Image (cartoon, coloured by chain):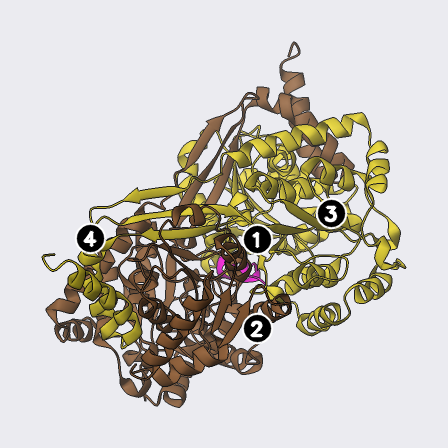
Chain colours: A yellow, B brown
Amino acid sequence: MKRLDIRDSGFEAGFSSLLASREEQSDKVNEPVAAILAQVRREGDTALCALTEKFDRLPLTPDKLAFTADEIEQACAEVSPELLEALDLAATRIESFHKTQLPKDTRYTDDAGMTLGMRWIPLDAAGLYVPGGKAAYPSSVLMNAIPARVAGVQRLAMCVPTPDGIINPLVLAAARRAGVTEIYRVGGAQAVGAMAYGTQTISPVDRIVGPGNAYVAEAKRQVFGHVGIDSIAGPSDVVVIADSNTDPRLIALDLLAQAEHDEEAQATLITPEASFADTVTAAVEAELKVLTRSAIARTSWERNGAVLVVRNFDEAIELANRLAPEHLELMVDDPEPLLARVRHAGAVFLGRYCPEAVGDYVGGPNHVLPTSRTARFASGLSVFDFMKRTTFLAGGPEALKRIGPAGVALATAEGLEAHALSISARLDALTKNTPNA
Amino acid sequence: MKRLDIRDSGFEAGFSSLLASREEQSDKVNEPVAAILAQVRREGDTALCALTEKFDRLPLTPDKLAFTADEIEQACAEVSPELLEALDLAATRIESFHKTQLPKDTRYTDDAGMTLGMRWIPLDAAGLYVPGGKAAYPSSVLMNAIPARVAGVQRLAMCVPTPDGIINPLVLAAARRAGVTEIYRVGGAQAVGAMAYGTQTISPVDRIVGPGNAYVAEAKRQVFGHVGIDSIAGPSDVVVIADSNTDPRLIALDLLAQAEHDEEAQATLITPEASFADTVTAAVEAELKVLTRSAIARTSWERNGAVLVVRNFDEAIELANRLAPEHLELMVDDPEPLLARVRHAGAVFLGRYCPEAVGDYVGGPNHVLPTSRTARFASGLSVFDFMKRTTFLAGGPEALKRIGPAGVALATAEGLEAHALSISARLDALTKNTPNA
């Protein structure tokens, strides 16, 4: 853990190096990923089966790539009613929030007589990547699939690796609840390749979303352009702005909820009280002694954790904006004025009773969020990721007479004669047909 | 030019091969681009000057990278008043349309007592790439810069190559009109590298937009993740759906307005009248004899042009959706019912007096549009490219009691103990403090 005090002379250098360490890293997996994608594109299902046997130790044949309706049914029967109810509450809240994102088509006619507008249209098919093994998170299934369904996407293919054949039944239950239409037991770069290029069994999709490891991220980067992708997911991070009015143990748990994700996760406390920094740090140590995932959380905290002591909340918000965190907790008495000044953050959690973990599961907003400081330009997953816009322009003879000549002038200046002629020949025709115009 | 009739047995095979030829191509410039980006990242301004001398035959020193206010002023003085007026009409109409895209923040409190919402925030800085040399299009400057300014982006850096030192004064006039704040005489992958990583002279931006050649496109792909980018631009394309009620020469000019862009451009006519296909084809030949850019247009038409004869407009729209064109012209008597059935197109132009060239310059909607069939998942440039969303979630003790337990159940099922504890410890504290709750 790195502790910096804004009053110390070394603060700016230390903070800059913290920023640099949180930029996206090059993962040096370009070449193996390119090879896997090429193999999938060339051999289709055969490649998927071979790679799944190699990486997931799971012998497969093409007819076993997809989970059957019976397998999904059976998995759901294994899940406790309490969990199914929790899943349903989460799904209902996520649906409800994402419905508020649905954009409206526009259409208007302006002074020149032109009619202009924009239509929002859902994608035909989306592909959802869901990490498997130890990171097989049913909540991720809901967060990836529900915005697509709310957007109106009809076909929703999901790929989830099942290392050694093991699948979390709750993942399948979540997929069913969220309206996923196809589920394949394939993971890694090969799953991304299958969804991008298609195989005999898996039809290609138009956009691939969902978090994954370095191979998945690199595969998404490489297929980008052929299909759409969401942002490249890096390690998860949180910035907690807090003062001593919150129990230090609660703040420690919020920091550790990030740290327990994986060793690269980044948890940062910013506080105006140096003594509170001490008590939270001590509380983190105490919790690390008892947490089940303490080995991971300790490595994350020691390597990537940070405690920043500032003079006031103004400075705290300024540093948070520079960190552009994935998650930002405002654990203070009056969080709203601080929220108004947040410029760069994926999602913000306001007030002592609204920890980030609520947002991971049952809040409603998406938990697939921009990492590695990309909140400077990127946003969380949303219905917008599953729709695209088509603009339109309509106009008759009178409108063309009003705005056409400027188009001819600009096209001519750009040396594009056919562009100019396609307008001017219509204007000429109008002049001939209506000599008094 | 490839002519296919839907009534012929070979149609489906021919059409599929047309589709495949219009997918994005791998440009085999990965390695030289990676080398250029590394050089810019390592050497900053020194690399920019060396590469500009090498590729644009323009010796530069760091202090000459940016155009000065005087240079811009002087360039604007060289532009005719008529052109400045045309530029202003275009800019005003583009501003006006893009203002209708500005999204509204949301905020609501739900039954559980949680307050949820989403804020749209402009990027701090955007970088605009503008092609130089023969493709130095002032209209592109307007189309790239205006949405950023409308979105509220404060810093707008523009890079435009000036091969042999030549700059189109109208490009600088357009940049001034559009509110660009910095203009650099740098192009190619090195310009993308400078905007992504920053140099001594050019501060890094958060997102890079604008079309460019294969090097620019590959550079954008490689810096994606470190900064945001818009979609990767391929060759321009148009699909024109028309019947014989329009003068075949006008349709020929619309097709050639695409074909004259470059040799890879793709122009397609879809018509239910075989004889109209003949007359348009003849008209294209006639125009190719007289057009100034006929060499380029002829190569494009012969290599990539297509004429598809169908039975009716239903089939025409179906093929257009499969082609997912950048531009779609509906040159028919009653285009509105056809528009309603367009699912995949960047921009649609309705009616005989609204050719695509109007949209290139003075229509209002953006002319930076998804190419290479990416309209299946991508959209034209917009204010959305220059904003990002921050979601927020707030709730007090009562709301936590309502939804917290489901969160604890799901976190526990996912094996994330600290997530569960960060909620349950708060619930415990509430129970202790309010024994009757």
Q: CA distance from mark 4 to mark 3?
A: 52 Å
Checking the image for residue A398, the label placed there is 4
Q: The residue under label 4 is which amino acid type?
A: Glu
- Count the labels in the image: 4
Q: The residue under label 2 is which amino acid type?
A: Ser
Q: Is residue A29 visible?
A: yes
Q: CA distance from mark 2 to mark 4?
A: 39 Å
Name the residue carrying label 1: A371
> Same chain for the residues at labels 2 and 4, yes or no?
no
Indicate the secondary structure of the residue bearing disc 3.
strand
Q: Residue furthest front?
A: B275
> Same chain for the residues at labels 3 and 1, yes or no?
yes
Q: Quadrant of the C terminus of chain B?
A: top right
Q: Nearer the viewer, mark 3 or mark 2?
A: 2
Task: Determine contact: label 1, label 2, CB under 8 Å.
Answer: no
Name the residue carrying label 3: A182
Task: Determine contact: label 4, label 3, CB under 8 Å.
Answer: no
Q: Is A119 rendered above or below residue B413?
A: below
What main secondary structure does the magenta stretch of the protein show?
helix
Residue A67: horizontal and vertical position, in percent?
A: 82, 47
- Looking at the rendering, the stretch of residues picked out in magenta corresponds to A15-24
Residue at horizontal 57 percent and vertical 70 percent from the top: B18
Letter of the chain that mark 2 sits on in the rendering? B
Indicate the secondary structure of the residue bearing disc 2.
helix
- Residue B434 versus residue B139: which sits nearer the camera? B139
Checking the image for residue B219, the label placed there is none
Q: Where is residue B57, by image quadrant? A: bottom left
Name the residue carrying label 2: B21
Q: The residue under label 3 is which amino acid type?
A: Glu
